[in-house]
Image (spheres, helix red, strand yellow):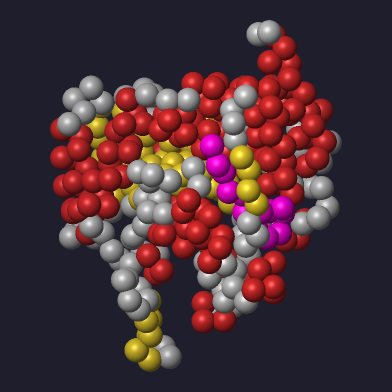
Amino acid sequence: MRLVVMPGDGIGPEVTAATVRVIEKLDRRLDLGIALETHEVGFVTLKSEGTTLPAAAMKAAEEADGVVLGPVSTLEYPPPEKGGVNVSAALRQGLDLYANLRPARSRRGIAHYGRTEMDLVIARENTEGFYAVRTMYQGGGEFMPTPDLAFAIRKISAEGSRRIARSAFTLAMRRRKKVTAVHKANVLKMSEALFLREVRKVAAEFPAVAYDEQLVDSMAAMLVRDARRYDVAVTTNMFGDILSDLSSELSGSLGLGASVNAGDTHCMAQAQHGSAPDIAGQDKANPVSLILSAAMLLDWLADRHQAENFSRAANMIERAVDVLLERPETRTRDLGGRLGTASFTTALEEALEGQLAAVE
């Protein structure tokens, strides 16, 4: 099983190194047969090759079974014509990773900031919406007729809506069997109506799954008031981006938010948070988001290849993270603990070893 690792920018190399350590640990102990291959992207290759996403890295991703992408500093990149390719967007589009799945779960020992605990997944459409680089075959989705007037085009397709809806309902069948479609059809009467039309069609194919709908602004409020009511929320690109960050922070910390970008043939693990260049190289970064994202990637590979040991590895990572987060002395500094990136990773490896020893 070939995984391509792209360390990225800022804290990316540190949290990616931590994630690789965890994968390698489980690969050795569970005989997963994983081959890891590193390809640099971001500022490193902008300097050496004139682009943030070299063709060789993209080709490797296309040929791999999965990708682990570290945080990237997209906002600081130069324009595309000067080599500043949006690495994340290019991979999502190029690999057709239409489903961005972002769980948010309250964890024992970590304070949550909503009124209730939560255990939900935001299923976000990932290839269209209001994101300018994802709306056009040629040209851009934003344009300025005059220096004082700007337009943005929103793309919603029946196919894109059906695909993310089917991902959401399939996921709900493995969870608590409820899907909430989040929309703004009272204002965006055409595009949101199209989205809801397709979601309702898919809902009819899953009679065992309860289905309801919620306006996006009231959804934001309800995540604060009573997040327990939600299981899987399916929505369009920008709404999903915002609501998933909100959910992760309310559940305890954005630094604990896992995320995969999945399609029919490819899957990419990617932390929810950014590259945090202000703490890069200081052993301060919390690697949990990317580590849990890698666990989701292992679970996706388990389903795709009927690889039971991959599912076991993913579950072990989740349990080990929960064990460490329960006590302040085994948390990173951002969560009130004392551990740095490297020492937390060592503690996580030890927790995994404890699980392995218990079943031998």
Horizontal arrangement in the rendering, residue 255 relative to residue 175 (left or right): right
Q: Nearer the viewer, residue 1 or 89?
A: 1
Q: Is residue 170 visible?
A: yes
Horizontal arrangement in the rendering, residue 5 relative to residue 182 (left or right): right
Q: In the displayed structure, would residue 87 be above or below residue 25?
A: below
Residue 39: quarter of image: bottom right
Residue 343: quarter of image: top right
Residue at 23% over, 57% down: 157
Could you tell me residue 220's position as x and y percent? 42, 45
Q: Is residue 217 visible?
A: no
Q: Nearer the viewer, residue 278 or 221?
A: 278
Residue at 65% over, 8% down: 359
Residue at 37% over, 65% down: 134
Could you tell me residue 355's position as x and y percent? 68, 15
Horizontal arrangement in the rendering, residue 50 relative to residue 279 (left or right): left
- Residue 5 among those drawn in magenta: yes
Where's the N terminus, which quadrant? top right
Q: In the displayed structure, would residue 53 be above or below residue 229?
A: below
Residue 294: quarter of image: top right
The residue segment tinted magenta is 1-13
Could you tell me residue 199's position as x and y percent? 22, 42
Could you tell me residue 195's position as x and y percent? 23, 51
